[in-house]
Structure formats: structure tokens, C-alpha cells
Image (cartoon, rainbow, N blue to C red):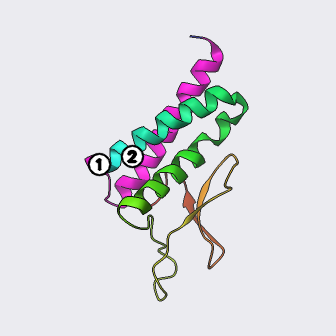
Amino acid sequence: MDPTTSALEQALHAARALVMADLTAREVAVADVVSLVEDAVAHRRWWVEQWPEGVEYVVGLVAQDVQDALLERYGRWPLCPVCVDSDPHALEVEPELGPDPHWVCAKAAVIVARVGALQ
């Protein structure tokens, strides 16, 4: 296995594990949702094969892909734990395209957790 493929596979496995940890922490890691994660990982595998320099962005992109797919099928996820007295809203991944992604509450301008560390 060449080093590029190895780095890609490591990044994809890490992205899968981190997003699954967040889904599990919020008790939504059911079979249909796990399938959404697998679809997102497969899509991002192709994406990084086209743009190898984007490998460091895979975690945040997979998290966003899963969040978008969940919104289409089930509703907002993950719900913000900070703004409990306002209308329910989802956390956002920041940076949108960058390394070291976090879940943030855009309304309160608060970092809630790294992707993979939701509670």
C-alpha cells in the first residue's frame, strides 16, 4: 500500500470512528444512520482520491455529510445543548473546510466539542 492510500484510509477510518462516537453519544447510532455514515465515507473516499490535499478535511466533511443526510431523513442533529431555553437548533461544524473540526453553537458563538467528543 502506498503512503497516499494509507493516509487516505487512516483519515477515512478516523472520520468514521469520530462521527460514530458522536452518533452513539447522542443515542442515534441505529442501522439506518450507520448506513448514512458509510455512504458519506464512500463519497469522501472518491473526493479525496480526486483532491489528495483535502485528506486533512475529511473528518469535518463526513460529519457535515451525515448531518445533512440526517436532516433530510430525520431532522436536525446534533441538537444544541447550550441554548436549552430557545428554539431547538443543530450545532454546526467549524471550520467548514479545515483541519480539527468542532461542533459549535453559532447562536451563542460557543465551541461545544470536537467532532468525535460530543456527550
Q: How many marks?
A: 2
Vertical placement of residue 50 versus 106, above or below: above
* 10 Å crowding of disc 1: few (<14), some (14-19), many (20+): few
Q: What number is the disc on residue 48?
A: none
In the rendered image, the quadrant that contains the N terminus is top right
Q: Is residue 27 magenta?
A: yes
Residue 6 position in % (x across, y down): 58, 20
Residue found at the very far front of the displayed protein: 72
In the rendered image, the quadrant that contains the C terminus is bottom left
Residue found at the very far bottom of the displayed protein: 85
Query: Is residue 119 in view?
Result: no
At label 1, the amino acid type is Asp
12 left or right, relative to 99: left
Q: Which residues are magenta?
A: 2-31
* 10 Å crowding of disc 2: few (<14), some (14-19), many (20+): some
Vertical placement of residue 30 versus 78, above or below: above
Q: Are marks 1 and 2 in contact (CB under 8 Å)?
A: yes
Residue 66 position in % (x across, y down): 46, 51
Q: What number is the disc on residue 36?
A: 2
At label 2, the amino acid type is Leu
Which quarter of the figure has residue 75? bottom left
Q: Which residue is mark 1?
A: 32
Residue at horizontal 45%, vertical 79%? Answer: 88
| Label 2: element kind | helix
SS assignment for the magenta stretch, majority = helix
Separation (CA) of disc 1 from disc 2: 7 Å
Which quarter of the figure has residue 95? bottom right
Vertical placement of residue 99 versus 70, above or below: above
Residue 43 position in % (x across, y down): 51, 36
Residue 13 position in % (x across, y down): 48, 33
Q: Is residue 48 magenta?
A: no
